[in-house]
Amino acid sequence: MTQPPKGAEELAYALITPYSLHKSRTGGIIARLLWANVKLVAARMYAPRPGSGFVEEYCDAIYDPGARHIPLRYQKMIIEYILKNFGKPNVRGISNRLVALVFRGPNAAHEIAEAAGHISQHVQGDNVRGTFGDFLREDSQNLAQDPAYRDRMTLLDKYRALREVELEPSRNDLFEPAVLTGTAPEINEAHLKLFRRRAYSDGGLVLDALGGLDSPTTETSMVVLKPESFRNRNPLPGNLIDFFARSGMFITGMKVMELGVERAREFYGLKLPQFREQLKGMVADRARRIVERAQMLAQEAVERLGADPDVALRPANALAAAKKVEDLYGGEPAPGEVKPHVVARLFELLGERLADLQPAETLYEELAEELKELNARAEFDQLIRYMTGKDPATGEPLQPGEETRCMAILYSGRDALSVIRKRLKELREVYGQDVLKNRAHASDPEEDPLKEMAVLGMPTAPQGESKPCDVDKVVTEFYGPP
């Protein structure tokens, strides 16, 4: 296979190891990888089944007797590591969950290999393996020849009660690469095609790979990391995953996607009833402020400009003055504020119903009830625009080229729905900007989590996972069908 020209688009991958997942290092690793000058385009969980062929095929794809890209010594270390850790049972007695992250961009193989770092005993904190991996080798034989070492070890003799205690032979090597990746485009192609072949037999929802989670209280919740966190080589998605890791829940599924308008409408459709009731108070408040401003402007006209009170304090005239100020200084409303066309309708209704500038509170309540649907739809459309980057009416991109990727993550564990929802509220306090740009969505136990998962085609959906999954789709689009 010929090498692609420098700067050509490539696919590359990083496979987060079972031990890294076990130690909740996933978020930190993803944050480091997102610094690379490539785009995350797919993510999928795997847990190789006994006898499925995944482990053997992966080792076959690594083995290269000609050592064109990886020295034989390191090939043996990696293959031995895979054989010991990727199956179940494994040497560490933990779940054999894996996360495959797929990246696309110019020179992606080099970018991800550099971000992952080299297998080395020299610690470098600027790459994934330097921070999250381990490669330690004891050198007891050479140390035994050093007088300073021998003198130090004789101190054991002073602890008499320990002389008869026998310890198991120490392990001489510790090798934990944290992530595995390909070092050249042709290696990545072979490995990614394997991930496509095994996407459904060994990937998707990996809850069964976790022992001890068969309790009746075990639930699965879904978190969706929102688009603004994926812009400008931002490591924030990894930080958010790290934040959720402190809930004690287990990652059991993962997917990268871009929402279209129709799917976003279906996904957030459950929010419309909530918007109607939760946001109608904003309409009442906005109407109240309009009347208060109209009254203030009318009084200023009388007191400072000498206007005729009978004319200035007439509701229609006062409202007209308030409307002029609104048109001049209203500006673009922030998320969660009443939208301009709803404000315009408020002015119309107030013009029809306002008998004086000190109306009863019931007027505001009636306006809020009457306009709650219009207001909820306006907020809903803003949410659709934000999540998809498209005009809800036409489906056309608002800013071509703007990043609109999301990442959906499944978390499983005891009472996961309420635990993750609580963690979400804490996360928004730290990372949220406003009611729209609040970084993440999480399943609400009071709504329909399974329906949400079904809309996004997650493997927990009652009717099963939608196909092709993101890894299958991305690999096929780039390399062609199997």
Image (cartoon, rainbow, N blue to C red):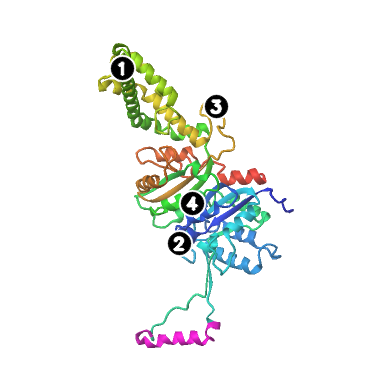
Residue 394's disc number = 3
Question: Which residue bears the numbered disc 4?
Answer: 238
Circle 2 Cα neighbour tier, 10 Å, few/some/many (<14 / 14–19 / ≥20):
some
Measure the C-alpha gap from mark 3 to mark 2: 50 Å
- Distance from Cα at disc 1 to Cα at disc 4: 60 Å
Q: Nearer the viewer, mark 4 or mark 2?
A: 4
- Contact, CB < 8 Å: mark 1 with mark 4? no
Of callouts 4 and 3, the N-terminal one: 4
Question: What secondary structure is found at the residue carrying circle 1?
Answer: helix
Give the mark, 3 or 2, whose residue is nearer the N terminus. Answer: 2
Task: Return the disc, 4 or 2, that comes first in the chain's sequence.
Answer: 2
The one nearer the camera, 185 or 402, is: 402
Q: Which residue is mark 1?
A: 302
Is residue 322 part of the magenta span, yes or no? no
Neighbourhood count class around disc 3 (C-alpha, 10 Å): few under 14, some 14–19, many 20 upward: few
Q: Residues within 10 Å of mark 4 (few under 14, many from 20)?
A: many
Q: From which residue to which does the magenta span run?
A: 141-162
The residue carrying mark 2 is 94
- The residue depicted at 55 percent of the width and 29 percent of the height is 395
